[in-house]
Image (tube, rainbow, N blue to C red):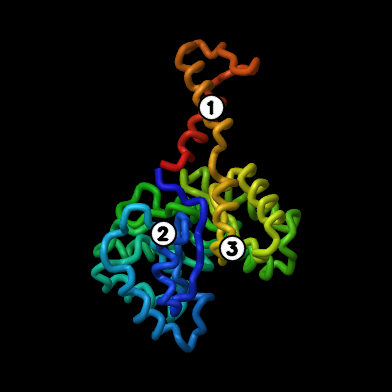
Amino acid sequence: MTLRRSVLFYPALSTERWDEAMNSGADMVVFDLEDGTVPARRAEARIAVLPLYAGPRKAGQPLRLLRVNNPRTEDGLRDLLAVVDCGDPPDGLILPKIEHAEEVRWVADVLRPRHPGLELVVLIESPRGIKNAMDIACSTAGRDGPQITCLFLGTADFSASIGSDLGWDALAHARAETVLAAQEAGIDAMDGVWFDPSDEAGLIDEAARIASMGFTGKASYDQVQIANIHAAFTPTPVQVGWAERVLAAAAADPLGTARVDGKMVNESIARRARRILDRRPT
């Protein structure tokens, strides 16, 4: 199982940081042609960054993603065509400001002939995107070609679009909808950035609460946050031990009457145990 606990962003023009990104320890790294690049320099950034993806991903390296511009824009169209023309494309694309399933299907159709194996990470950043999150998350299911692997809630842009702060209560509904849509589609769910790298306690608290909701990862702009993010989304030895005992008890008692630590073990508990073991780093 490919873990997508963290995604670390770099500006597309910061090509000198490529080796830093590859050694960052993040599960995914993104060079950003959208918010990380001023509009006047996007053509320059496109030319500069795409050659860095040449060659296969080496063992231990993060997934190498590229955030393109929204496919409804001129910059987004130029980004997609540049990726199509790449002999060695990124491992995947982050698609920002997606609001309809058809947008994702159209991107997948454009990429399919030359790059059918690309991952698509879909970024939801608006009320309409949240309203359509279930359809968006499931939009590539059963189709050939690029597949959505992760639904990503852009908390900052979403908050700006509704006039709220980044507080827990303000984002609770959007987060719940994101998790439910991702689970329905059988894909990962990524939460937005914790913007203060000096507030370690705040990050740890929010990441733990996000993980308890069912999210599988959290985004970052700062490498110093990666260890704490991974800790929140990686099972502890105690959790792994519990999961192994649950599955052993369930296998030994197909009638569903087994108990672990005095508590009943049924199929829903066994399913939770399997999910825990699936999240172990290899």
Looking at the image, residue 72 lies above or below residue 150: below
Residue corresponding to mark 1: 241
On the image, numbered disc 3 is attached to which residue?
Answer: 154
The residue under the point 51% across, 55% down is 6
* Labels 2 and 3: the sequence-earlier one: 2
Q: How many marks?
A: 3
- State the image coordinates of residue 121 (x, y, percent, origin top left): 45, 59
User: Quick one: label 1 or label 2, which is nearer the N terminus?
Assistant: 2
Secondary structure state at the residue bearing disc 1: helix
- The picture places residue 116, in percent across and down from the top left corner, at 29, 58
N-terminal of the pair, mark 3 or mark 1, is: 3
- Quarter of the view holding residue 194: bottom right
Left of 145 or right of it: where is 182? right
Q: Residue at x 42, y 61 (%)?
A: 23
Tell me the crowding category of disc 3: few under 14, some 14 to 19, or many 20 or more residues within 10 angstroms, Cα based.
many
- Amino acid carrying label 2: it is Leu
Residue corresponding to mark 2: 120
Name above or below for residue 189 compared with residue 275.
below
